[in-house]
Amino acid sequence: MECIFCNIVEKKVKADMVLEREKFIAFRDIHPKAPVHLLAVPRKHIDSVDHLQGEDAGLMGELLLFAKEVAREQNLEGYKLQINVGRKGGQVIDHIHLHILGGNAEEI
Ligand code: AMP
Ligand code: ZN
Protein backbone atom coordinates (compact mmCIF):
# COMPACT_ATOMS: atom_id res chain seq x y z
CA MET A 1 0.00 0.00 0.00
CA GLU A 2 1.30 3.44 -0.99
CA CYS A 3 1.75 5.71 2.02
CA ILE A 4 2.29 9.42 1.36
CA PHE A 5 4.10 9.97 4.69
CA CYS A 6 6.41 6.96 4.11
CA ASN A 7 7.18 8.53 0.72
CA ILE A 8 8.02 11.84 2.44
CA VAL A 9 10.20 9.96 5.00
CA GLU A 10 12.01 8.26 2.09
CA LYS A 11 12.33 11.57 0.19
CA LYS A 12 10.34 10.20 -2.76
CA VAL A 13 7.83 13.02 -2.21
CA LYS A 14 8.87 16.56 -1.29
CA ALA A 15 7.70 18.32 1.83
CA ASP A 16 8.49 21.62 3.51
CA MET A 17 10.71 19.98 6.13
CA VAL A 18 11.40 21.81 9.38
CA LEU A 19 13.28 19.21 11.47
CA GLU A 20 14.73 15.75 10.85
CA ARG A 21 15.93 13.40 13.54
CA GLU A 22 16.83 9.70 13.66
CA LYS A 23 13.30 8.50 14.42
CA PHE A 24 11.11 11.46 13.39
CA ILE A 25 10.57 14.16 10.82
CA ALA A 26 8.52 17.37 10.99
CA PHE A 27 7.18 19.29 8.02
CA ARG A 28 4.55 21.95 7.24
CA ASP A 29 0.99 20.83 6.63
CA ILE A 30 -0.02 21.64 3.03
CA HIS A 31 -3.45 22.83 4.19
CA PRO A 32 -2.60 24.79 7.37
CA LYS A 33 -5.43 25.16 9.86
CA ALA A 34 -3.45 27.51 12.14
CA PRO A 35 -0.83 30.27 11.60
CA VAL A 36 1.79 27.55 12.15
CA HIS A 37 0.67 24.02 11.34
CA LEU A 38 3.32 21.31 11.46
CA LEU A 39 3.15 17.53 11.40
CA ALA A 40 5.48 15.43 13.55
CA VAL A 41 5.80 11.98 12.02
CA PRO A 42 7.66 8.84 13.15
CA ARG A 43 9.77 7.32 10.38
CA LYS A 44 8.28 3.97 11.41
CA HIS A 45 4.96 3.28 9.71
CA ILE A 46 2.16 2.74 12.20
CA ASP A 47 -1.39 3.17 10.85
CA SER A 48 -2.90 4.97 13.83
CA VAL A 49 -3.14 5.15 17.62
CA ASP A 50 -5.54 2.21 17.34
CA HIS A 51 -2.67 0.16 15.87
CA LEU A 52 -0.11 0.93 18.59
CA GLN A 53 1.51 -2.03 20.34
CA GLY A 54 3.07 -2.06 23.78
CA GLU A 55 6.50 -1.94 22.14
CA ASP A 56 5.61 1.49 20.65
CA ALA A 57 5.18 3.16 24.08
CA GLY A 58 8.73 4.51 24.10
CA LEU A 59 8.44 5.81 20.55
CA MET A 60 5.26 7.74 21.38
CA GLY A 61 6.94 9.29 24.42
CA GLU A 62 9.85 10.31 22.21
CA LEU A 63 7.35 11.77 19.71
CA LEU A 64 6.19 14.21 22.40
CA LEU A 65 9.79 15.19 23.16
CA PHE A 66 10.39 15.65 19.42
CA ALA A 67 7.30 17.90 19.20
CA LYS A 68 8.69 19.98 22.07
CA GLU A 69 11.99 20.33 20.20
CA VAL A 70 10.18 21.34 16.99
CA ALA A 71 8.13 23.95 18.88
CA ARG A 72 11.26 25.40 20.44
CA GLU A 73 13.09 25.53 17.09
CA GLN A 74 10.09 27.31 15.54
CA ASN A 75 9.91 29.75 18.48
CA LEU A 76 6.34 28.75 19.32
CA GLU A 77 5.39 30.28 22.66
CA GLY A 78 2.29 28.12 22.92
CA TYR A 79 0.81 25.39 20.80
CA LYS A 80 -1.71 22.60 20.64
CA LEU A 81 -0.96 18.96 19.90
CA GLN A 82 -3.59 16.83 18.20
CA ILE A 83 -3.81 13.25 16.99
CA ASN A 84 -6.82 12.23 14.90
CA VAL A 85 -7.72 8.55 15.13
CA GLY A 86 -9.75 6.72 12.51
CA ARG A 87 -12.00 8.17 9.78
CA LYS A 88 -14.65 9.14 12.31
CA GLY A 89 -11.93 10.86 14.33
CA GLY A 90 -10.92 12.93 11.31
CA GLN A 91 -7.86 10.88 10.32
CA VAL A 92 -7.21 11.01 6.58
CA ILE A 93 -3.59 9.80 6.35
CA ASP A 94 -3.06 6.30 7.75
CA HIS A 95 0.46 6.92 9.09
CA ILE A 96 0.45 8.06 12.69
CA HIS A 97 1.22 11.77 13.11
CA LEU A 98 0.97 14.55 15.63
CA HIS A 99 -0.40 17.94 14.55
CA ILE A 100 1.49 20.87 16.07
CA LEU A 101 -0.71 23.96 15.91
CA GLY A 102 0.82 27.30 16.83
CA GLY A 103 -0.28 30.92 16.87
CA ASN A 104 -2.62 32.86 19.10
CA ALA A 105 -4.96 30.77 21.23
CA GLU A 106 -8.08 32.14 19.47
CA GLU A 107 -6.64 31.14 16.07
CA ILE A 108 -5.85 27.55 16.98
P1 AMP B 1 -5.16 13.77 9.51
O1 AMP B 1 -6.50 14.33 9.07
O2 AMP B 1 -4.97 13.81 10.98
O3 AMP B 1 -4.89 12.42 8.89
O4 AMP B 1 -4.11 14.80 8.95
C1 AMP B 1 -3.50 14.69 7.70
C2 AMP B 1 -2.90 16.02 7.40
O5 AMP B 1 -1.91 15.83 6.41
C3 AMP B 1 -3.89 17.06 6.85
O6 AMP B 1 -3.91 18.20 7.69
C4 AMP B 1 -3.36 17.36 5.45
O7 AMP B 1 -3.50 18.72 5.11
C5 AMP B 1 -1.90 16.94 5.56
N1 AMP B 1 -1.26 16.50 4.34
C6 AMP B 1 -1.70 15.62 3.44
N2 AMP B 1 -0.81 15.41 2.46
C7 AMP B 1 0.25 16.19 2.77
C8 AMP B 1 1.52 16.43 2.15
N3 AMP B 1 1.86 15.82 1.01
N4 AMP B 1 2.37 17.31 2.73
C9 AMP B 1 2.02 17.93 3.87
N5 AMP B 1 0.85 17.75 4.51
C10 AMP B 1 -0.02 16.89 3.97
ZN1 ZN C 1 3.59 5.23 6.15
Image (cartoon, grey):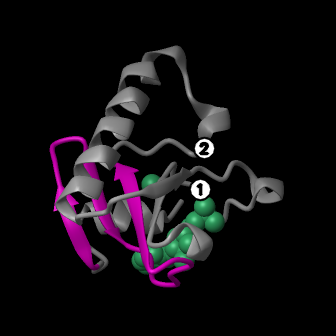
Residue occupied by mark 1: 94
> Where 61 falls versus 82 (above or below)?
above
User: Is 72 part of what is drawn in magenta?
Assistant: no
Query: The disc labelled 2 sits on which kind of residue?
Result: Ser
Real-space Cα separation, disc 2 to disc 1, in angstroms: 6 Å
User: Is 41 part of what is drawn in magenta?
Assistant: yes
- Local packing at callout 2 (Cα closer than 10 Å; few below 14, some 14-19, many 20+) is some
- Local packing at callout 1 (Cα closer than 10 Å; few below 14, some 14-19, many 20+) is some
In screen coordinates, is 68 left or right of 56?
left
Q: Secondary structure at mark 1?
A: loop
- Percent from the top left, x then y, of residue 102? 43, 67
Do callouts 2 and 1 mark residues in contact (Cβ within 8 Å)? yes
Magenta span covers which residues?
16-42
Residue nearest the viewer, comparing 49 with 35: 35
> Where 83 falls versus 56 (above or below)?
below
- Percent from the top left, x then y, of residue 95? 51, 53
Residue appearing at x 59%, y 56% in the figure: 94
Name the image quarter holding the C terminus.
bottom right
Residue occupied by mark 2: 48
Check residue 59 in the rendering and tell me which mark sits there, or answer none.
none
> Where 48 falls versus 27 (above or below)?
above
Residue appearing at x 68%, y 59% in the figure: 91
